[in-house]
Amino acid sequence: MSNSEEFRKSLQCSPSAIPTEEEKQKIINEYKSKMSKRFNSYYEDPAIRNYFNHVIAAIMISQYENYEQFGINIPYRYKARNSTKNKIENRLNDAVVHYTDDGNLVLDNMPQLNDIFAMKIVSRRRPPVLHSDDPQIQEYIEEQRNNRDFLERMQKFRSSLMINDNGSKKASNYKYECSKIEYYEKCKEVLTKLKEVVDPKATKLIEYYDKKIEDIESCLEFLRASHTNDEPDEIVSEADYTNPNFNFFDLLRRI
């Protein structure tokens, strides 16, 4: 071998040698081919697909064994080949092709790609418990039932105040048939219920509701004192429906 040939050979194996564009493209193509074959084998291997099916089944069985009152759905899928291909291409944007100290051409700075399988665990609602032999649980059930009945009554009253109870809160959608006394009595009921469900530690909020209830009682006393047996109760107006201090619609949304 001539001296010039030996010199060129040493450059090819030198750590400082710079790969040509052809060399870079060759190793990149080899990487793409290798990764494509690997992921294709994952998709096409029945044992691998069966493994994932068993993983999903194991999760669901364990869930039902430990929390039989709760259900879950686990929709899952195998990632599309084009999705994997695109992720490989994106990782190659930051790849570095270089010679190692021993003269090997390598591809570095490639984050590991684990993109075969995707799943989502969706918890289903627990079926309602309507009875229990446990006194404390039964007490909670009764409380929930009472709250539901209360909310139903208040929603029914709300519907009676509007032409279209799914429509907007505008003067053109209000009905003006309810008495002021009934309207503010319902406001007081909602305020009282809101106070009942507040955590006892929330003393500031309880004080706020106490003040609101006191104010609305004063309003009701005035309305009752103004009413005589010879005259019907005063009917609500738009001002009552938009009253910022005692607004039935806004209060009901807090329940």
Image (cartoon, rainbow, N blue to C red):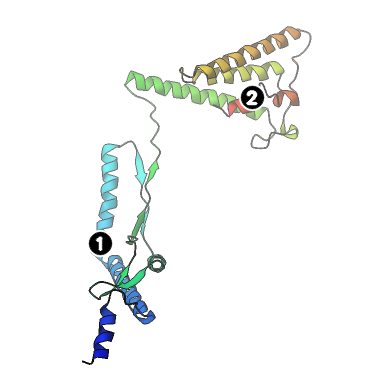
Question: Which image quarter holds the N terminus?
Answer: bottom left
Q: Give the vertical position of 1 relative to 118 (above or below).
A: below
Q: Position of residue 93 (x, y in %)?
A: 41, 68
Q: Give the vertical position of 59 relative to 5 (above or below).
A: above
Labels 2 & 1 near each other (Cβ < 8 A): no
Q: Which residue corresponds to the image point at 51% horizontal and 24% vertical from the top-left?
A: 149
Mark identifier at residue 248: 2
Crowding at label 1, few (<14), some or many (≥20) Cα neighbours within 10 Å?
few
Asked where in the image residue 44 lies, by quadrant, the reply is: bottom left
- The answer to whether residue 182 is seen in the rendering is yes
Q: Position of residue 86 (x, y in %)?
A: 41, 67
Q: CA distance from mark 2 to mark 1?
A: 60 Å
Q: Which residue corresponds to the image point at 75% horizontal and 26% vertical from the top-left?
A: 238
Crowding at label 2, few (<14), some or many (≥20) Cα neighbours within 10 Å?
many
Mark identifier at residue 171: none
Q: Which residue corresponds to the image point at 37% horizontal and 25% vertical from the top-left?
A: 131
Taking depth in this image into account, of 229 and 67 the one nearest to the observer is 67
Residue at mark 1: 48
- The answer to whether residue 177 is seen in the rendering is no
Asked where in the image residue 52 lies, by quadrant, the reply is: bottom left
Residue type at mark 2 is Phe
Question: Please, what secondary structure does the residue beneath circle 2 have?
Answer: helix
Left or right: 50 as drawn, with respect to 76: left
Left or right: 216 as drawn, with respect to 50: right
Residue type at mark 1 is Ile
Q: Which residue corresponds to the image point at 64% horizontal and 24% vertical from the top-left?
A: 248
Taking depth in this image into account, of 120 and 101 the one nearest to the observer is 101
